[in-house]
Image (cartoon, rainbow, N blue to C red):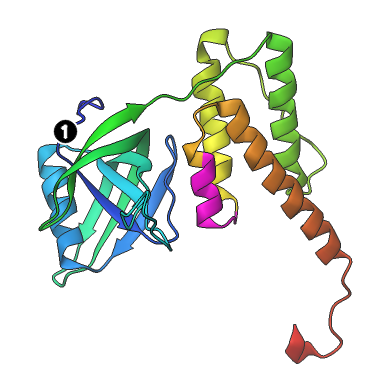
Amino acid sequence: MSTHRTTNLPFLALPETVFFPHTFVDLELTLPHHKELFRSAQSQGLPVGVFLAKRLVTEDEPEAYARLGSFGRIIELTTSASTSCNVTLHGLYRARIKRVTRLRPYPLANITLLTDHLHVASPQQFHKILDDLVALVQRFKLVEERPVVTLPKPEKWREFFSVLVNAVAAFLPADAHRKQEWLNQDDLIERYELIRQEMVRLWKLNQVLSQVPPAEDPNLN
């Protein structure tokens, strides 16, 4: 399957769901047109886009979904005799909808592929950023021995860092519209900085909660 086709690709808008490249997402869908969408996409070898359904629409952006989302390859698709289906997607790339070409029975769109950028001044700077990311992730897991992360070759920096940053973004328990702000960011370093702020906030919250004594009444636990 070519990952560079940009015309008439199927997509769906889902509430509280932001999909990142290089990550996996499991979807349980019950609407009949979703089942038809994924069956058709699988038979044609097409990627499927996942876009965040917006809480509010504006005059500038009247669509009921964010214009920027991610497309993924169907890894697994299970459908029942009813209308439900379960699907696993692997994120391929971010994209912006240029024009919706069809709405029914499921939406199709022409898209613009988006590129992630990584600008670092030196290997030392990248190593420092990577160490910072690893240290933040490890704060959430209490182990004595920390794994050593080897710096990849320079030509692999963007891919390697993108996978790490997007994986952390996907798993953080943050508000979906905040995650959409991360996805909108083309610069990987700036995307990481936004994610880092949320990681630090969550870590501090966990530290505070760990100091709260357990309730004496077992029914309150």
In the figure, residue 100 lies in which quadrant?
A: top left
Query: Would you say 147 lies left or right of 45 here?
Result: right
Q: Nearer the viewer, residue 50 or 28?
A: 50
Query: Would you say 91 lies left or right of 9 here?
Result: right
Q: Nearer the viewer, residue 63 or 143?
A: 63
185 magenta-colored: no
Q: Residue at x 26, y 27 (%)?
A: 3
3 in relation to 109, above or below: above
Q: Residue at x 15, y 55 (%)?
A: 106
Identify which amino acid the numbered label 1 is placed on: Thr
Query: Would you say 174 lies left or right of 132 here?
Result: left
User: Which region of the structure is painted magenta?
Assistant: 173-182
Residue 5, percent across and down? 20, 28
In the figure, residue 165 lies in which quadrant?
A: top right
Query: Would you say 135 lies left or right of 92 here?
Result: right
Q: Residues within 10 Å of mark 1 (few under 14, many from 20)?
A: some
Which residue ends up furthest to the front in the rendered image? 59
Q: Nearer the viewer, residue 14 or 138?
A: 14
- What is the secondary structure assignment of the residue under circle 1? loop
Q: Residue at x 18, y 38 (%)?
A: 46
Per the image, the residue denoted by label 1 is 7
Residue 215, percent across and down? 84, 83
Q: Quadrant of the C terminus?
A: bottom right
